[in-house]
Image (cartoon, rainbow, N blue to C red):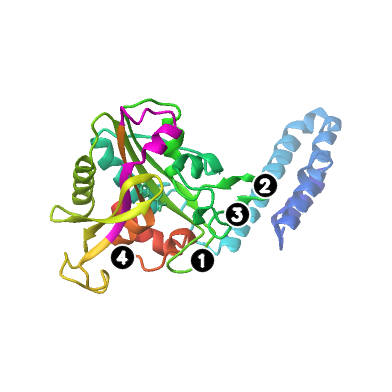
Amino acid sequence: MIEKIAKMLGEVEALRAESLDEIEALRIKYLSKKGEITALMADFRNVPADQKKEIGIKINELKNKALEKINALKDEFAVAETGNDDLDITRTAYPVALGTRHPLTIVKNEIIDIFARLGFSLAEGPEVEDDWHVFSSMNFAEDHPARDMQDTFFVEAHPDIILRTHTSSVQSRVMEKQQPPVRVLCPGRVYRNEAISARAHCFFHQVEGLYVDENVSFTDLMQVLLLFSKEMFGEDTQIRMRPSYFPFTEPSAEMDVSCTLCKGKGCAMCKGSGWLEILGCGMVHPQVLEANGIDSTKYKGYAFGMGIERIANLKYQVKDLRLFSENDKRFLEEFEAAN
Ligand code: DAH
């Protein structure tokens, strides 16, 4: 038995392996339940009492040696596989490389922050919506072109179910549940059936604002949006309103801010005009209030809606909309400092 142990010890010391599979085969050969060393240990029962001590020590040595050798082979392999021969297992696990917030999230949070200070609370609605909340309750005529197949994604089996084309649907979701005063901000993703290019995408993000109460005026709307623009783009920012049309507001306007790059002097970004369009707004149409269960003789409201990508573009001069959804780490990491 002593000879057998000595022979096996020699064998174990000389073990070599080419792959993790081979190492596993060696472990099975020597150390598994049916392995050779395990068998030796079972034989130990038959060793005469006067030799038990000596042989016991040797078998243990052999077993430990085999374990050590197999682990050493495994380690060699781990190093070979990662090519990392100066692996420092004493190094602490920190600093951990943290991810960065997406630029659209950064801008969204900034917008929410500003309006939260003005008393706006958050509201959300579903992205998969019905025609009523997206169009009918928002005073879109039956034949309004925005309902067209070219703009709206329909769920084929249910023509009434669509992907919302704007966050204005959340206005309706809020008003149908809550009587004035209503003061909400509704951020969310919206979808439009457009060809993807540097300037358009089939989905993007909006923030909707809605304020309904007694005695709400267009001046209130302008004051709130001026304050927002100054907070967002800088104290010296100016705004201007241009008359416009939306089915859900009357009167309606589009709002420009003085160019964030040239401060109104005229440059390539503002195409020489000194102004940049950033949002649509207006006084909530009485028919929208009524359609959503609010008495339009008692209450008035204002609303506005802006694209988050648009604001982010102006803040960070991102030239290609597609960058926002490609998850290229080189792009995303540029916003580390803004987190
Ligand atoms: N829903 C409009 C759009 O998607 C944006 C908008 C304009 C929202 C005027 C409003 C508003 O609340 O009053 O283009």
Q: What stretch is highlighted in magenta?
A: 277-299
Q: Which residue is drawn at 74% across and 40% down?
A: 59
**Could you tell me how far apart the alpha carbons at marks 4 and 2 are, in whole angstroms?**
65 Å
x and y, in percent, of residue 291 in the image: 45, 34
From the image, tell me which residue sits under label 1: 196
Q: Residue at x 78, y 30 (%)?
A: 50
From the image, tell me which residue sits under label 2: 65
Please name the amino acid that badge 3 sits on: Asp
**Mark 2 within 8 Å of ligand 1, using the beta carbon:** no
User: Mark 2 or 3 closer to N-term?
Assistant: 2
Asked which secondary structure carries label 3, the reply is helix
User: Mark 4 or 2 closer to N-term?
Assistant: 2
Whether tag 4 and tag 1 are in contact, CB under 8 A, the answer is no
Whether tag 2 and tag 3 are in contact, CB under 8 A, the answer is no
Closer mark to the observer between disc 2 and disc 3 = 3
Closer mark to the observer between disc 4 and disc 2 = 4
Please name the amino acid that badge 1 sits on: Ile
Neighbours of disc 3 within 10 Å: few (<14), some (14-19), many (20+): few
Neighbours of disc 2 within 10 Å: few (<14), some (14-19), many (20+): some
Nearer to the camera, 206 or 223? 223
From the image, tell me which residue sits under label 3: 75
Q: Residue at x 79, y 47 (%)?
A: 28
Residue 315 is at least partly visible in this image: no
Whether tag 4 and tag 2 are in contact, CB under 8 A, the answer is no
From the image, tell me which residue sits under label 4: 317
> Image height check: is 62 above or below 256?
above
x and y, in percent, of residue 315 in the image: 28, 59
Residue 229 is at least partly visible in this image: yes
Nearer to the camera, 180 or 233? 180
Closer mark to the observer between disc 1 and disc 2 = 1
